[in-house]
Amino acid sequence: MKQIKKMFLLSLIIISVGIAASLSLKVSIGVGAYDALAQSISFLTGIKVGTIGMIFNTSCIVGQLILLRKGFKIRHLLQLPLTILIGVVINFFFYEVWGSITIDSYILRVMLLMAALAIVAFALAIMLVLDVVTFPLEGFCMTLSKKTKWNFVFIRQSVDLLCILLVVLLTFGFSLSLTLREGTVIGMLLMGPLIGFFMKMIQPVLRKFDLINEEEREIVTNKDSIEVV
C-alpha cells in the first residue's frame, strides 16, 4: 500500500513538473541549460520540444545501462515511464493549452516563471525525499560520478556548461531564437535554495502519511545535500 501511494504521488508530481516546465518555456525569458538545448534543437528541427526531451532523457537511461550493466535495477528502469509522461505533458500543455495564449506583459512573464520554478522545486523536493526514482540526467551524472570517482556537482555543472556552449553555437550558427536569457540565471540562483527549503518542509508531512520513515529520511537528506549543493 505504501508503494502504491508513493507511485500515485510521483505520477502527480511528474505531471506537475511537466506543466510547470511547459509554462517556463511559454514565457520565453530563458530556461535551464538542458531545457534550452532541447528547445533550440526543437527550433532547428521542428520536432516538438517534449519529444526532444524524451530523446535526451532516454539517452541518459541508456548511458546508465551501459555504465551499470548488471547493476542496472528496476528503479533505474522507472526513469523510462517518467521520461515518457513528462514529455507527453510538456508537448500537450506547451502546444495545445498555452499555444494560443499571448503574454505581452514582461512583469507577468517574470511572475509566471517564478511560479513555474517554485512548482518544479517543490516537485523535485518531494521526489528527492521519496527516493524512488530520479530524473534521467541526474541519474546518469550520479552513475558517472560513482564509476569515475569524479565529484557529482562537477559532472552536473559540466553538462550544463556543455549545453550552454551548444545552445550558443546553434543560436548563432543557425540564427535561432535565444533560449538562454535572464530566466536561466534566475533559475540557477533560486532552484537549489528552493529545493532545500521545500525538502525540509515536506519531510514531516510525508512521514505523517507514512510515505517515508526516519531512516529513509536520513539517507535521502545526506545524499541530496551532495546533489543540490
Image (cartoon, rainbow, N blue to C red):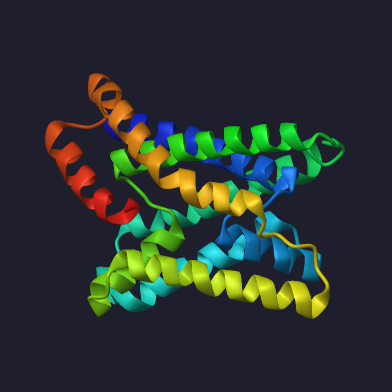
Residue at x 40% of width, y 60% of height: 138
What is the x, y in percent for residue 139? 37, 61
- Evaluate whether residue 219 shows in this view: yes
Percent across and percent down for residue 55 are 60, 66
Q: Report which quarter residue 125 is drawn in.
A: top left
Q: Is residue 68 left or right of residue 184?
A: left
**Left of 174 or right of it: where is 186?**
left
Residue 55 left/right relative to 7: right
Residue 59 shown left or right of residue 104 in the figure: left
Image coords of residue 34 (percent x, y): 56, 62
Does 43 sit above or below residue 200?
Answer: below
In the rendered image, the quadrant that contains the N terminus is: top left
Q: Residue furthest top?
A: 208
Q: Residue at x 72, y 75 (%)?
A: 170
Asked whether 222 or 190 is in front, the reply is: 190
Residue 72 is at least partly visible in this image: no
